[in-house]
Image (cartoon, grey):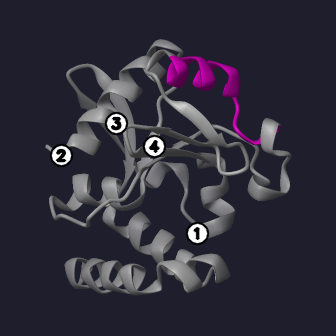
Amino acid sequence: MSDKFKEFLIITEELNKKNIIPLLMGSLGLEFVTEKDWNARDIDIHVSGDPRGWEAPDEERVYQWNDIIDVMAELNYKLIDLHEHEFIKDNISVEYGVIDTLPSFANVTLDELTYQNINNIEFYTPNLEAFLKIYLSSSEDSYRADNNNSKDFEKISYLKSQLT
């Protein structure tokens, strides 16, 4: 279990106390699901929020934002970017996104998410098919095309090989 995943569980345990069951996304989520090291740079957590995603105002996009700020402060994280909903502590970056954008962004329905429970810590992960849809959609995003396409294409290739 990686240090980032252990940190995710610490954060998630506190989020659960606020009745928030997050979705573990990104490379760390893919590492958990595939048991393969994807060199996760950060912790991507998605929670309930405005389905408009980036079109919603930064301070209204993530529901229960004040609870999340409290949890992160209790764990000694500092908010460094409201637009990205990014916190940092000891070189660990945690970014919050909105689970409710998945249907419009990647055609992923919420029933394609897998419920996880580790020592009574509850969270969701995308299944392999959902991860493939997410990475295919992400690879078409102009920001990611400039910053992450090689990593995305490697993940897409891997996921396709696992699903055929």
Label 2 – label 3 distance at C-alpha:
10 Å
Task: Specify few, some or many for label 2: CA neighbours under 10 Å numbering under 14, 14-19, or 20 or more.
Answer: few
Label 4 – label 3 distance at C-alpha:
11 Å
Residue 96 in the image, given as x and y percentages of width and height: 57, 44
Instruction: Look at mark 2 in the image and give the residue it sits on.
Output: 2
- Mark 2 vs 4: CB contact within 8 A: no
Magenta region: which residues? 60-73
User: Is residue 71 or residue 157 the one in the foreground?
Assistant: 71
Instruction: Give the mark, 2 or 4, whose residue is nearer the N terminus.
Output: 2
Instruction: Give the mark, 4 or 1, whose residue is nearer the N terminus.
Output: 4
The answer to whether residue 127 is left or right of residue 58 is left
Instruction: Give the mark, 2 or 1, whose residue is nearer the N terminus.
Output: 2
Q: Judge depth for marks 1 and 3 and give the one in front.
A: 3
Secondary structure under tag 1 reads: helix
Name the residue type under label 2: Ser
User: Is residue 12 or residue 128 the one in the foreground?
Assistant: 12
Instruction: Look at mark 1 in the image and give the residue it sits on.
Output: 106
Instruction: Give the mark, 2 or 3, whose residue is nearer the N terminus.
Output: 2
Label for residue 23? Answer: 4
Residue located 45% across and 43% down the image:
23
- Mark 2 vs 1: CB contact within 8 A: no
Secondary structure under tag 4 reads: strand
Q: Is residue 153 magenta?
A: no
Name the residue type under label 3: Phe
Label for residue 8? Answer: 3
Task: Specify few, some or many for label 1: CA neighbours under 10 Å numbering under 14, 14-19, or 20 or more.
Answer: some
- Mark 4 vs 3: CB contact within 8 A: no
- Mark 4 vs 1: CB contact within 8 A: no
